Image (cartoon, grey):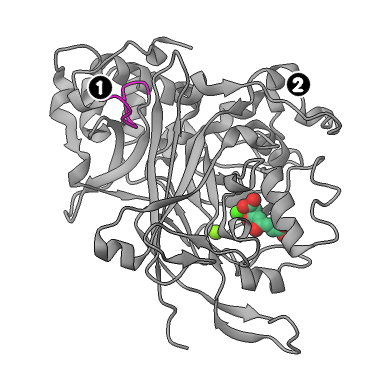
């Protein structure tokens, strides 16, 4: 821990000191933004309270490594900053923390843009996107629905399972997601049909942005893995369950999941998450991981307690001015595999991760059924509707529904930090 985590540190930006604010001075997450509706250039920014530090403007006020880092973040993506590695982003975070601390505004006050005036871009050019499956609770509950005889496959507790996703359809919060068409095979039918998905779902996930890459052919060791991670965001892996159930064997998800993935604009750095570390543990009877996925240092601190929630607002609720209703709530601390294990496993065969690559953690579900991170789990495969305040109910998503995820970390002795939000709305399918 360093001075940037000091819970007593406060900022001359008044909104940053509001209790419970997602973006106090202890957080300082990164995004790519511009003034909404303007022709301004997209550039990197750091959140402080209700404001954004414009990094293109701030670069000239900083020195050394921090100034270089701010210049690298002045373009329309954070890839150049990510490529510089953890020390560079850390130097910038420290310089900003110092310049934003205290009672008296510094020269940085000229570089602030109100968040209410901003629009956001996907924060990196995402070359590759891989989605993992790190929640054993999600894997067990979804597995029971797709494969009643073998819910948790025998490989699960040995190998961090994932599939290669699609980066072209990743959008930033506010994305309008067109209900996809796909092939589905109704129970008892003899031939599939092409139709709009009738079982559209969300998946409550975190995204992991890669910072410094690794050369092709050179695996990243577990204890070095986190030095390749820039930070975490919120991620909704929209999923067409009826398409998935028919297409996924034997090669895994394909069109059921590649039509849209929505991420939050703000990336919370691993450094900001430091106070919320937990030991990485295994339940009695779980196998010891292979040596490349295990180390003493990893066991000590590889889990992170990030609380995650999903809320639903239907078009009717929006019309009446009713707030979104919470439907899922869990924590990343329940994940079976850690961020470091995802990176070590992804590269163990020599696969090269590159700056700006995105890893999904997989749906975060907790041990209790109420902690399910998707509708397919909450509704037991669409059999038990979720009833919303106001009387409507849902098995799967309907047109006009807005799904919002939030996440935060809190514990005694640390300042609470948050991730902002990721939001997406379902549009009707294109006419056939
Ligand atoms: O168990 C299956 O066959 C598939 C489950 C998923 O939908 C998994 C997926 O996208 C990974 C995850 O979000 O955990
Ligand atoms: Ca997923
Ligand atoms: Mg997806």
Residue to which mark 2 is pinned: 295
Q: Secondary structure at mark 2?
A: loop
Residue at horizontal 34 percent and vertical 57 percent from the top: 174
Q: Secondary structure at mark 1?
A: helix
341, above or below 188, in the image = above
Q: Nearer the viewer, mark 2 or mark 1?
A: 1
| Residue interval drawn in magenta | 18-26
Residue to which mark 1 is pinned: 17
Residue at horizontal 79 percent and vertical 46 percent from the top: 156
Quick one: label 2, few (<14), some, or many (20+) residues within 10 Å?
few
- Find the distance from the CA under tag 2 to the CA under tag 1: 38 Å
Which quadrant of the structure image shows residue 17? top left
Q: Nearer the viewer, residue 217 or 225?
A: 225
Residue at horizontal 63 percent and vertical 87 percent from the top: 193
Position of residue 116 in the picture relative to residue 28 (left or right): left
- Rendering coords of residue 349 (x, y %): 76, 42
- Rendering coords of residue 227 (x, y %): 57, 26
Q: What is the number of callouts on the image?
A: 2
228, above or below 129, in the image = above
- Rendering coords of residue 416 (x, y %): 40, 24
The numbered disc on residue 300 is none
Q: Residue furthest front?
A: 391
Ligand 1: image quarter: bottom right
Which quadrant of the structure image shows residue 286? top right
Position of residue 26 in the picture relative to residue 217 (left or right): left
């Amino acid at each position: 821990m360093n001075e940037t985590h000091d819970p007593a540190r406060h900022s001359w930006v008044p909104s940053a000191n509001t209790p419970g604010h997602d973006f106090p001075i202890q957080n300082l997450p990164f995004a790519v933004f511009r003034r909404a509706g303007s022709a301004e250039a997209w550039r990197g920014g750091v959140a402080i309270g209700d404001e954004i530090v414009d990094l293109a403007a701030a670069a000239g006020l900083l020195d050394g490594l921090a100034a270089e880092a701010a210049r690298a973040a002045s373009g329309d993506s954070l890839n150049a900053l990510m490529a510089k590695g953890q020390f560079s982003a850390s130097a910038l975070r420290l310089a900003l923390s110092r310049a934003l601390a205290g009672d008296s505004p510094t020269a940085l006050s000229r570089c602030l843009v109100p968040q209410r005036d901003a629009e956001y871009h996907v924060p990196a050019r995402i070359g590759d996107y891989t989605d993992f499956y790190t929640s054993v609770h999600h894997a067990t509950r979804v597995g029971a629905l797709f494969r009643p005889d073998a819910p948790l496959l025998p490989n699960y507790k040995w190998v961090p399972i994932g599939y290669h996703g699609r980066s072209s359809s990743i959008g930033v919060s506010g994305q309008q997601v067109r209900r996809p068409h796909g092939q589905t095979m109704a129970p008892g039918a003899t031939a599939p049909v092409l139709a709009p998905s009738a079982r559209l779902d969300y998946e409550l996930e975190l995204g992991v942005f890669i910072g410094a890459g690794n050369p092709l052919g050179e695996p990243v060791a577990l204890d070095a893995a986190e030095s390749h991670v820039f930070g975490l965001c919120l991620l909704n892996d929209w999923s067409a369950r009826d398409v998935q159930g028919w297409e996924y064997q034997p090669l895994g998800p394909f069109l059921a999941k590649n039509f849209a993935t929505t991420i939050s604009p703000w990336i919370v750095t691993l450094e900001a998450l430091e106070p919320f570390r937990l030991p990485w543990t295994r339940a009695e009877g779980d196998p010891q991981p292979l040596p490349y996925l295990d180390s003493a240092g990893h066991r000590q601190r590889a889990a992170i307690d990030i609380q995650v929630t999903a809320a639903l607002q239907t078009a009717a609720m929006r019309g009446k001015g009713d707030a979104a209703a919470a439907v899922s709530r869990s924590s990343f601390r329940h994940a079976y595999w850690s961020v470091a294990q995802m990176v070590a496993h992804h590269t163990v065969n020599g696969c090269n991760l590159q700056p700006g690559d995105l890893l999904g953690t997989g749906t975060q579900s907790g041990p209790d059924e109420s902690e399910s991170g998707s509708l397919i789990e909450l509704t037991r495969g669409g059999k038990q509707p979720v009833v919303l305040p106001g009387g409507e109910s849902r098995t799967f998503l309907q047109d006009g529904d807005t799904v919002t995820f939030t996440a935060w970390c809190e514990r005694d002795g640390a300042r609470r930090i948050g991730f902002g939000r990721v939001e997406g709305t379902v549009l009707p399918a294109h006419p056939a």
